Amino acid sequence: MKAKPLRLAVGPDGNTSYLPCEPSEATHVMLNTPGPIQTIILPVMIKGTRAGTGNWTWNGDTEKPTLRPSILSRCPPICECCHSFVNDGQIQFLSDCTHELVNQTLDLLDVE
């Protein structure tokens, strides 16, 4: 599995956690990348308009995920910038990345 669908759950104590779920129930998706920021959890939606939501659109595919828009992370000291697109199960590291995978397209890693 290249994208793990998760549902944000709030327990009786008010604490939140992510629970595995079916893609149609997902509020978030977990990706495992070969880049400097290995595990990424993003809020997603499969249907509707993302305008004003802060969510990424996800095609609902766990083997060949596609997400929009791009993913931009700034995480010192790991790297100054990691900017990528996820298309059909691959991650494309863009030219403004400040790590060794800049301008490369690689397969997403399996998520356990």
Image: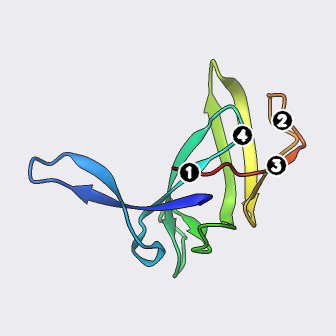
Judged by depth in the image, the label closer to the viewer, 2 or 3, is 3
Q: Amino acid at mark 3?
A: Leu
Judged by depth in the image, the label closer to the viewer, 2 or 4, is 4
Q: Residue at x 62, y 37 (%)?
A: 38
> Among all residues in the image, which is located at the extreme left?
12
Q: Earlier in the sequence, mark 1 or mark 2?
A: 2
Q: Earlier in the sequence, mark 2 or mark 4?
A: 4
Q: Amino acid at mark 2?
A: Leu
Q: Secondary structure at mark 4?
A: loop
| Residue 39, image quadrant | top right
Q: Are marks 2 and 3 in contact (CB under 8 Å)?
A: yes
Res. 34 mark: 4
Q: Earlier in the sequence, mark 2 or mark 3?
A: 2
Q: Are marks 2 and 4 in contact (CB under 8 Å)?
A: yes
Judged by depth in the image, the label closer to the viewer, 1 or 3, is 1
Q: Amino acid at mark 1?
A: Val
Res. 22 mark: none
Judged by depth in the image, the label closer to the viewer, 1 or 2, is 1
* Relative horizontal placement of residue 16, taking residue 55 as reference (left or right): left
> Among all residues in the image, which is located at the extreme top?
77
Q: Position of residue 1 (x, y in %)?
A: 59, 60
Spatial distance from mark 2 to mark 3, Cα to Cα? 9 Å
Spatial distance from mark 1 to mark 2, Cα to Cα? 20 Å
Spatial distance from mark 2 to mark 4, Cα to Cα? 9 Å
**Compared with residue 103, is residue 69 higher up or lower down, i.e. above or below?**
below
Spatial distance from mark 4 to mark 3, Cα to Cα? 7 Å
Q: Amino acid at mark 4?
A: Pro
Of residues 46 and 53, the one nearer the viewer is 46
Q: Are marks 4 and 3 in contact (CB under 8 Å)?
A: yes
Res. 111 mark: 1
**Compared with residue 12, is residue 56 higher up or lower down, i.e. above or below?**
below
Res. 106 mark: 3
